[in-house]
């Protein structure tokens, strides 16, 4: 019996020293973990804070058939230059009907439309878009986002748009219809191009040379004008060198 009392007393003495030490170490670890987590959050918040500079995204009428976005309705990781800073791995959508970039709010569970004029360029689904002001277009087209299809002496641009087509003026029959327009930028001047004739006029090349080039590459302008325009400009670059 005296031995049992002695053992219990020893355990009590050890507990007096060991438990506070364990608790202190545990508290220190939790404090460090919390501080580390807070520092990471602050860094992330600081880096993404500019992307919270926008307005809440206005959802489209769900009765309209299709969707207004570029390519897909799924969030896609892309990159953009916004308000003078570059952001990578940003989940975004490109609304072609509103011509707006939509991102997830970093702090709140909602969608934000970024300020269009603050976006210099962005990449989504491996496609490169740039922002052009109306003045830089010489009023030949509206300002906004343009896809960069080819960048050389002559820049080939595509304006992607989705318009709401409503045959019977009823939401039940409304649908999103994509319309693509093309432009050449040559010597700081932009030209709308639609037909083979308008392409030749801008590039100042003969029809025979262009037709021969298209036949050689099995390209029919009427069937795929976008592919034809890029191919013609690449050929034009070779002739100019």
Image: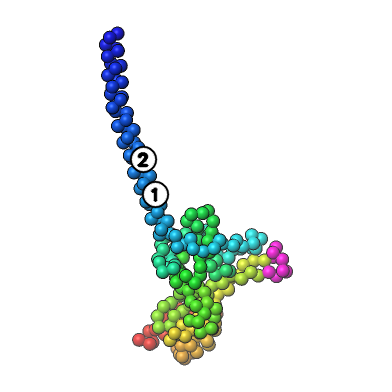
Give the residue at x 64% y 66%.
175
Residue in front for this viewpoint, 199 or 51: 51
Crowding near pointer 2: few (<14 within 10 Å), some, many (20+)?
few
Left or right of 121 in this view: 32: left
Q: Is residue 136 magenta?
A: no
> In the rendered view, would you say 34 is above or below 171?
above
> Closer to the camera, 89 or 58?
58
Q: Is residue 184 above or below residue 21?
A: below
Residue at the image position 48 percent from the left and 60 percent from the top:
52
Q: Secondary structure at mark 1?
A: helix
Instruction: Point out the image quarter for the C terminus.
Output: bottom left
Q: Position of residue 142 (x, y in %)?
A: 55, 78
Choose top left, top right, bottom left or bottom right for residue 186: bottom left
What residue sits right under mark 2 in the picture? 30
Residue 163 appears in the rendering:
yes
Residue designated by label 1: 38
What is the span of residues highlighted in magenta in the rendered image? 166-173
Which element carries disc 2, helix, strand or loop?
helix
């Amino acid at each position: 019996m005296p031995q049992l009392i002695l053992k219990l007393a020893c355990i009590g003495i050890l507990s007096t020293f060991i438990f506070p030490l364990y608790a202190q170490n545990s508290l220190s670890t939790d404090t460090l973990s919390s501080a580390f987590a807070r520092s990471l959050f602050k860094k992330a918040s600081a880096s993404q804070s500019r992307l919270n500079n926008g307005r809440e995204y206005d959802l489209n009428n769900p009765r309209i058939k299709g969707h207004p976005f570029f390519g897909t309705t799924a969030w896609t990781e892309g990159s953009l230059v916004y308000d003078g800073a570059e952001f990578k791995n940003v989940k975004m959508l490109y609304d072609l009907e509103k011509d707006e970039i939509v991102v997830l709010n970093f702090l709140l569970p909602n969608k934000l439309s970024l300020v269009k004029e603050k976006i210099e360029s962005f990449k989504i689904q491996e496609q490169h878009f740039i922002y052009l002001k109306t003045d830089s277009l010489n009023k030949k087209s509206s300002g906004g986002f343009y896809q960069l299809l080819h960048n050389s002496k002559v820049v080939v641009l595509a304006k992607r748009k989705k318009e709401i087509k409503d045959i019977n003026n009823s939401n039940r029959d409304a649908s999103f219809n994509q319309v693509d327009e093309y432009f050449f930028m040559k010597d700081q001047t932009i030209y709308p191009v639609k037909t083979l004739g308008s392409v030749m006029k801008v590039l100042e090349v003969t029809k025979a040379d262009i037709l021969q080039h298209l036949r050689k590459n099995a390209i029919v302008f009427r069937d795929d004008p976008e592919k034809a325009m890029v191919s013609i400009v690449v050929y034009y670059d070779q002739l100019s060198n």
